[in-house]
Image (cartoon, rainbow, N blue to C red):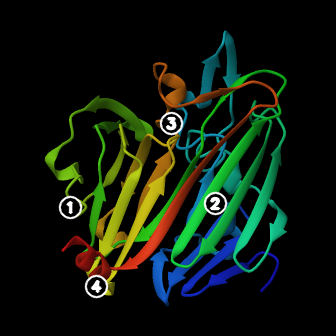
Protein backbone atom coordinates (compact mmCIF):
# COMPACT_ATOMS: atom_id res chain seq x y z
CA UNK A 1 0.00 0.00 0.00
CA UNK A 2 1.07 3.60 -0.49
CA UNK A 3 2.37 5.71 2.38
CA UNK A 4 -1.06 7.30 2.65
CA UNK A 5 -2.71 3.91 3.25
CA UNK A 6 -1.39 1.69 6.04
CA UNK A 7 -2.93 -1.76 6.63
CA UNK A 8 -3.12 -3.29 10.11
CA UNK A 9 -4.13 -6.97 10.31
CA UNK A 10 -4.49 -9.53 13.08
CA UNK A 11 -6.60 -12.68 12.97
CA UNK A 12 -9.96 -11.59 11.51
CA UNK A 13 -9.56 -7.84 12.00
CA UNK A 14 -8.28 -5.56 9.20
CA UNK A 15 -8.00 -1.79 9.63
CA UNK A 16 -6.74 0.67 7.05
CA UNK A 17 -5.19 3.86 8.49
CA UNK A 18 -3.95 7.06 6.87
CA UNK A 19 -1.61 9.80 8.13
CA UNK A 20 -4.00 12.16 6.31
CA UNK A 21 -6.03 13.54 9.20
CA UNK A 22 -4.84 10.66 11.39
CA UNK A 23 -7.88 8.84 10.00
CA UNK A 24 -9.11 5.28 9.86
CA UNK A 25 -10.22 4.64 6.28
CA UNK A 26 -12.03 1.35 6.90
CA UNK A 27 -12.34 -1.50 9.40
CA UNK A 28 -13.57 -5.03 8.72
CA UNK A 29 -13.93 -8.06 10.95
CA UNK A 30 -13.89 -11.37 9.07
CA UNK A 31 -14.83 -9.33 6.01
CA UNK A 32 -17.81 -7.60 7.68
CA UNK A 33 -17.65 -3.77 7.72
CA UNK A 34 -17.58 -2.44 11.29
CA UNK A 35 -16.89 1.19 10.36
CA UNK A 36 -18.51 2.93 7.42
CA UNK A 37 -16.28 4.90 4.97
CA UNK A 38 -18.01 8.25 4.47
CA UNK A 39 -17.36 11.50 2.63
CA UNK A 40 -16.50 14.22 5.17
CA UNK A 41 -14.72 17.61 5.04
CA UNK A 42 -11.64 15.90 6.52
CA UNK A 43 -8.26 15.72 4.79
CA UNK A 44 -8.49 11.98 4.10
CA UNK A 45 -11.81 12.49 2.32
CA UNK A 46 -10.44 15.42 0.36
CA UNK A 47 -7.51 13.37 -0.98
CA UNK A 48 -8.72 9.76 -0.83
CA UNK A 49 -12.51 10.10 -1.11
CA UNK A 50 -13.78 8.89 2.27
CA UNK A 51 -12.81 8.10 5.86
CA UNK A 52 -14.39 6.05 8.64
CA UNK A 53 -13.06 7.64 11.85
CA UNK A 54 -10.90 10.62 12.77
CA UNK A 55 -9.47 12.09 15.99
CA UNK A 56 -10.89 15.20 17.65
CA UNK A 57 -8.04 17.42 18.87
CA UNK A 58 -7.61 19.93 20.53
CA UNK A 59 -11.42 19.93 20.85
CA UNK A 60 -14.47 18.35 19.27
CA UNK A 61 -17.56 19.76 17.60
CA UNK A 62 -18.16 23.54 17.26
CA UNK A 63 -17.20 26.64 19.23
CA UNK A 64 -19.83 29.37 19.20
CA UNK A 65 -18.70 32.52 17.35
CA UNK A 66 -15.37 30.69 16.77
CA UNK A 67 -14.11 32.48 19.89
CA UNK A 68 -13.87 32.03 23.66
CA UNK A 69 -12.60 33.62 26.86
CA UNK A 70 -10.23 31.86 29.22
CA UNK A 71 -8.58 33.18 32.37
CA UNK A 72 -9.23 36.78 31.41
CA UNK A 73 -8.04 36.57 27.82
CA UNK A 74 -9.99 36.58 24.56
CA UNK A 75 -9.18 34.00 21.90
CA UNK A 76 -10.41 33.78 18.30
CA UNK A 77 -10.25 30.97 15.76
CA UNK A 78 -10.88 31.00 12.03
CA UNK A 79 -13.53 28.68 10.56
CA UNK A 80 -11.71 25.70 9.08
CA UNK A 81 -14.35 24.17 6.76
CA UNK A 82 -17.42 25.38 4.86
CA UNK A 83 -19.22 25.40 8.22
CA UNK A 84 -19.56 28.98 9.58
CA UNK A 85 -18.06 27.88 12.91
CA UNK A 86 -14.68 26.33 13.63
CA UNK A 87 -15.24 22.56 13.67
CA UNK A 88 -13.51 19.54 15.26
CA UNK A 89 -10.11 21.19 15.78
CA UNK A 90 -7.07 20.62 13.57
CA UNK A 91 -6.23 16.92 13.64
CA UNK A 92 -8.64 15.75 10.97
CA UNK A 93 -7.40 18.46 8.55
CA UNK A 94 -3.65 17.92 8.90
CA UNK A 95 -1.12 15.32 7.78
CA UNK A 96 0.33 13.39 10.73
CA UNK A 97 3.84 11.92 10.88
CA UNK A 98 4.42 8.21 11.45
CA UNK A 99 6.42 7.61 14.63
CA UNK A 100 6.16 3.81 14.78
CA UNK A 101 4.46 1.12 12.74
CA UNK A 102 4.15 -2.66 12.68
CA UNK A 103 1.55 -5.13 11.42
CA UNK A 104 -0.80 -4.52 14.34
CA UNK A 105 -0.30 -0.87 15.31
CA UNK A 106 0.71 2.57 14.15
CA UNK A 107 1.60 5.65 16.20
CA UNK A 108 1.07 9.03 14.58
CA UNK A 109 2.32 12.46 15.63
CA UNK A 110 1.00 15.96 14.90
CA UNK A 111 2.65 19.27 15.81
CA UNK A 112 0.46 22.35 15.58
CA UNK A 113 1.74 25.90 15.91
CA UNK A 114 -0.36 28.87 17.04
CA UNK A 115 -1.31 31.27 14.27
CA UNK A 116 -3.85 33.91 13.32
CA UNK A 117 -6.30 31.02 12.80
CA UNK A 118 -5.87 29.37 16.22
CA UNK A 119 -4.34 30.05 19.63
CA UNK A 120 -3.62 26.35 20.17
CA UNK A 121 -0.03 25.18 19.97
CA UNK A 122 0.37 21.51 20.85
CA UNK A 123 1.72 18.09 20.04
CA UNK A 124 -0.77 15.25 19.59
CA UNK A 125 0.10 11.56 19.54
CA UNK A 126 -2.39 8.93 18.40
CA UNK A 127 -1.91 5.16 18.55
CA UNK A 128 -4.20 2.85 16.61
CA UNK A 129 -3.74 -0.82 17.52
CA UNK A 130 -5.55 -4.09 16.87
CA UNK A 131 -5.45 -7.40 18.71
CA UNK A 132 -7.75 -10.32 18.03
CA UNK A 133 -11.26 -8.87 17.94
CA UNK A 134 -10.34 -5.45 19.42
CA UNK A 135 -9.39 -2.04 18.03
CA UNK A 136 -7.94 0.48 20.46
CA UNK A 137 -7.60 4.22 19.86
CA UNK A 138 -5.48 6.29 22.21
CA UNK A 139 -4.95 10.03 21.88
CA UNK A 140 -2.71 12.39 23.85
CA UNK A 141 -2.25 16.15 23.59
CA UNK A 142 0.56 18.23 25.13
CA UNK A 143 0.17 21.98 25.43
CA UNK A 144 3.09 23.74 23.67
CA UNK A 145 1.62 27.25 23.99
CA UNK A 146 3.34 29.68 26.41
CA UNK A 147 0.12 30.02 28.44
CA UNK A 148 -2.45 27.60 29.90
CA UNK A 149 -5.31 26.67 27.57
CA UNK A 150 -8.38 24.41 27.82
CA UNK A 151 -8.20 21.20 25.80
CA UNK A 152 -10.57 18.39 24.93
CA UNK A 153 -10.28 15.11 23.03
CA UNK A 154 -12.56 12.72 21.22
CA UNK A 155 -13.11 10.38 18.31
CA UNK A 156 -15.53 10.60 15.39
CA UNK A 157 -16.33 7.08 14.10
CA UNK A 158 -18.90 6.36 11.38
CA UNK A 159 -20.85 3.13 11.88
CA UNK A 160 -23.03 1.35 9.31
CA UNK A 161 -26.73 2.13 9.71
CA UNK A 162 -29.08 -0.74 8.86
CA UNK A 163 -32.86 -1.24 9.29
CA UNK A 164 -32.49 -3.83 12.06
CA UNK A 165 -29.67 -2.31 14.09
CA UNK A 166 -30.01 -1.41 17.76
CA UNK A 167 -27.92 0.96 19.88
CA UNK A 168 -27.26 0.55 23.61
CA UNK A 169 -25.87 3.47 25.64
CA UNK A 170 -26.65 4.89 29.08
CA UNK A 171 -26.50 8.64 29.83
CA UNK A 172 -27.99 10.95 32.45
CA UNK A 173 -29.34 13.67 30.17
CA UNK A 174 -29.41 14.94 26.63
CA UNK A 175 -29.07 18.37 25.04
CA UNK A 176 -31.38 19.88 22.47
CA UNK A 177 -29.92 21.24 19.24
CA UNK A 178 -30.22 24.92 18.36
CA UNK A 179 -29.14 27.08 15.45
CA UNK A 180 -25.76 26.42 13.83
CA UNK A 181 -25.85 22.88 15.24
CA UNK A 182 -24.91 24.04 18.73
CA UNK A 183 -26.24 22.38 21.90
CA UNK A 184 -29.30 24.13 23.30
CA UNK A 185 -30.54 23.19 26.76
CA UNK A 186 -30.07 20.03 28.85
CA UNK A 187 -33.09 18.02 29.86
CA UNK A 188 -34.37 14.60 30.88
CA UNK A 189 -33.96 11.82 28.37
CA UNK A 190 -36.77 11.64 25.79
CA UNK A 191 -38.20 8.17 25.39
CA UNK A 192 -37.09 7.86 21.77
CA UNK A 193 -33.51 8.85 22.66
CA UNK A 194 -33.14 6.64 25.73
CA UNK A 195 -30.89 3.80 24.63
CA UNK A 196 -30.23 2.35 28.09
CA UNK A 197 -32.14 -0.82 27.17
CA UNK A 198 -31.39 -0.62 23.47
CA UNK A 199 -33.33 0.99 20.69
CA UNK A 200 -33.46 1.95 17.04
CA UNK A 201 -32.45 5.40 15.84
CA UNK A 202 -35.20 7.83 14.88
CA UNK A 203 -35.93 8.09 11.18
CA UNK A 204 -35.23 11.82 10.83
CA UNK A 205 -32.41 14.20 11.64
CA UNK A 206 -30.50 13.41 14.82
CA UNK A 207 -27.64 15.56 16.18
CA UNK A 208 -27.65 15.67 19.98
CA UNK A 209 -25.13 15.70 22.79
CA UNK A 210 -25.51 13.44 25.84
CA UNK A 211 -23.68 13.70 29.15
CA UNK A 212 -23.48 11.68 32.34
CA UNK A 213 -22.40 8.81 30.08
CA UNK A 214 -20.99 5.68 31.71
CA UNK A 215 -18.42 5.20 28.93
CA UNK A 216 -20.02 2.11 27.39
CA UNK A 217 -21.86 1.61 24.10
CA UNK A 218 -22.92 -1.36 22.00
CA UNK A 219 -24.34 -1.62 18.49
CA UNK A 220 -26.01 -4.79 17.24
CA UNK A 221 -26.57 -5.59 13.56
CA UNK A 222 -28.79 -8.70 13.32
CA UNK A 223 -28.44 -8.67 9.54
CA UNK A 224 -24.72 -9.42 9.89
CA UNK A 225 -24.86 -11.37 13.18
CA UNK A 226 -22.45 -8.72 14.46
CA UNK A 227 -22.11 -6.56 17.55
CA UNK A 228 -19.53 -3.93 18.47
CA UNK A 229 -18.96 -2.76 22.02
CA UNK A 230 -17.17 0.50 22.76
CA UNK A 231 -15.47 1.06 26.12
CA UNK A 232 -14.11 4.52 26.89
CA UNK A 233 -11.83 5.40 29.79
CA UNK A 234 -12.88 7.59 32.72
CA UNK A 235 -12.01 10.81 30.87
CA UNK A 236 -15.05 10.39 28.62
CA UNK A 237 -18.32 11.63 30.08
CA UNK A 238 -20.10 12.76 26.90
CA UNK A 239 -21.01 11.61 23.44
CA UNK A 240 -22.67 13.07 20.37
CA UNK A 241 -25.11 11.00 18.36
CA UNK A 242 -25.41 12.10 14.74
CA UNK A 243 -27.43 10.67 11.88
CA UNK A 244 -28.74 12.84 9.03
CA UNK A 245 -31.42 10.33 7.95
CA UNK A 246 -32.33 6.67 7.69
CA UNK A 247 -31.10 6.66 4.09
CA UNK A 248 -27.63 8.04 4.88
CA UNK A 249 -26.24 4.55 5.43
CA UNK A 250 -24.24 5.61 8.50
CA UNK A 251 -24.53 7.11 11.96
CA UNK A 252 -21.90 8.60 14.26
CA UNK A 253 -21.41 7.87 17.93
CA UNK A 254 -18.72 10.33 18.99
CA UNK A 255 -17.09 9.81 22.41
CA UNK A 256 -15.88 13.14 23.79
CA UNK A 257 -14.15 14.25 26.98
CA UNK A 258 -16.19 17.46 26.94
CA UNK A 259 -19.54 18.76 25.78
CA UNK A 260 -19.88 20.47 22.39
CA UNK A 261 -19.38 24.21 22.74
CA UNK A 262 -17.93 23.59 26.20
CA UNK A 263 -15.94 26.81 25.83
CA UNK A 264 -19.20 28.72 26.36
CA UNK A 265 -20.67 26.55 29.10
CA UNK A 266 -20.30 26.60 32.87
CA UNK A 267 -17.27 25.00 34.57
CA UNK A 268 -17.44 21.22 34.82
CA UNK A 269 -18.01 20.91 31.08
CA UNK A 270 -15.16 18.45 30.60
CA UNK A 271 -12.44 20.71 29.21
CA UNK A 272 -9.02 20.20 30.82
CA UNK A 273 -6.77 23.12 31.68
CA UNK A 274 -3.26 22.32 30.52
CA UNK A 275 -0.34 24.43 31.64
CA UNK A 276 2.60 24.67 29.22
CA UNK A 277 4.15 21.20 28.87
CA UNK A 278 1.24 19.35 30.50
CA UNK A 279 -0.35 16.35 28.75
CA UNK A 280 -3.88 14.97 28.64
CA UNK A 281 -4.66 11.56 27.18
CA UNK A 282 -7.70 9.40 26.61
CA UNK A 283 -8.48 5.99 25.11
CA UNK A 284 -11.38 4.00 23.69
CA UNK A 285 -11.54 0.33 22.70
CA UNK A 286 -13.92 -1.27 20.22
CA UNK A 287 -14.53 -5.02 20.37
CA UNK A 288 -16.19 -7.06 17.62
CA UNK A 289 -18.28 -10.12 18.43
CA UNK A 290 -20.86 -12.40 16.87
CA UNK A 291 -24.36 -11.80 18.18
CA UNK A 292 -24.96 -15.46 18.93
CA UNK A 293 -21.91 -15.41 21.23
CA UNK A 294 -23.46 -12.59 23.27
CA UNK A 295 -26.79 -14.46 23.43
CA UNK A 296 -25.12 -17.59 24.81
CA UNK A 297 -23.25 -15.58 27.46
CA UNK A 298 -26.52 -13.99 28.62
CA UNK A 299 -28.28 -17.34 29.17
At a point 57% along the width and 77% down the height, the residue shown is 26
Q: Which residue is mark 1?
A: 199
Residue 102 location, x and y as percent?
A: 78, 76
Q: Which residue is mark 2?
A: 42
Of the numbered discs in the image, which one, if any, rests on residue 258?
A: 3
- Closer to the eye: label 2 or 1: 1
Decide if residue 161 is on the left or right side of residue 10. left
User: Disc 1 or 3, which lies upstream in sequence?
Assistant: 1
User: Disc 3 or 2, which lies upstream in sequence?
Assistant: 2
Decide if residue 222 is on the left or right side of residue 97. left
Q: CA distance from mark 4 to mark 2?
A: 30 Å
At a point 35% along the width and 37% down the height, the residue shown is 212
Q: Quadrant of residue 63?
A: top right
Decide if residue 217 is on the left or right side of residue 25. left
User: Disc 4 or 2, which lies upstream in sequence?
Assistant: 2
Q: Secondary structure at mark 1?
A: loop
Q: CA distance from mark 4 to mark 3?
A: 34 Å
Q: Secondary structure at mark 2?
A: loop
Residue 150 location, x and y as percent?
A: 64, 27
Residue 156 location, x and y as percent?
A: 53, 57
Q: CA distance from mark 1 to mark 3?
A: 25 Å
Query: Is there a contact, CB below 8 Å, between mark 3 and mark 2?
Result: no
Q: CA distance from mark 3 to mark 2?
A: 21 Å
Asked whether residue 45 appears in the rendered view, the answer is: no
Q: Quadrant of residue 187?
A: top left
Query: Is there a contact, CB below 8 Å, between mark 2 and mark 1?
Result: no
In-front residue for pair 228/109 = 228
Q: Count residues near mark 3 (Cα–Cα under 10 Å), then give few for <14, some for 14-19, many for 20+.
A: many
Q: Count residues near mark 4 (Cα–Cα under 10 Å), then give few for <14, some for 14-19, many for 20+.
A: few
Amino acid sequence: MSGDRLLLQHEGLAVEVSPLGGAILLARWHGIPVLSPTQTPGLASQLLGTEACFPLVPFGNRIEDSAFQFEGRDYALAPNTADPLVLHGDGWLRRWSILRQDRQSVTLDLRQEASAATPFAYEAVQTIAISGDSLSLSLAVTNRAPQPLPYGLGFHPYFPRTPGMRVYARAAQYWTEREKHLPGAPGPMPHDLDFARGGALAAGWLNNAFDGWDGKMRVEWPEADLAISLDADENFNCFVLYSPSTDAGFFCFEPMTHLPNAYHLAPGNGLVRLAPGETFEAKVTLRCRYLDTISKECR
